[in-house]
Amino acid sequence: MRRVFLLLLLLVASMVVWRLGERLSADALGMAIGIVLGVLASLAVDVVCRLPRHHFGRKGVGD
């Protein structure tokens, strides 16, 4: 049941994106894709920055 729901959600999202792509100019579409990819990249950087910092093989102050 969950797979069917996810498949339907993917289908609807694809149709919405397709219709949006028909209406927008090439420049606007490129800008929208760039913004989405930039947001996704910032999420990955945020996750990496929140990881605990371990210095393997180095003895520092407080170790």
Image: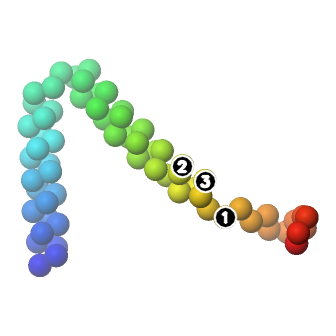
* Image point (29%, 28%), residue name: 30
Helix, strand or loop at disc 1? loop
Residue 52: give its label. Answer: 1
Helix, strand or loop at disc 2? helix
Quickly name the residue at label 2.
45
Residue 19 horizontal side relative to residue 38, left or right: left
* Image point (11%, 44%), residue name: 16
CB contact under 8 Å: marks 1 and 2: no
The three-letter code of the residue at mark 3 reads: Cys
* Image point (11%, 56%), residue name: 11
Helix, strand or loop at disc 3? helix
When the figure is inspected, residue 16 is found, relative to residue 55, above or below; the finding is above
CB contact under 8 Å: marks 3 and 2: yes
Residue 62: give its label. Answer: none
When the figure is inspected, residue 27 is found, relative to residue 8, above or below; the finding is above
The three-letter code of the residue at mark 2 reads: Val
Locate the N terminus and report the quarter of the image it occupies.
bottom left
Q: Quadrant of residue 36?
A: top left
The residues tagged by marks 1 and 3 sit, at their Cα atoms, a distance apart of: 8 Å
Quickly name the residue at label 3.
49
Residue 49 horizontal side relative to residue 63, left or right: left
Residue 20: x and y in percent read 13, 35
When the figure is inspected, residue 22 is found, relative to residue 10, above or below; the finding is above
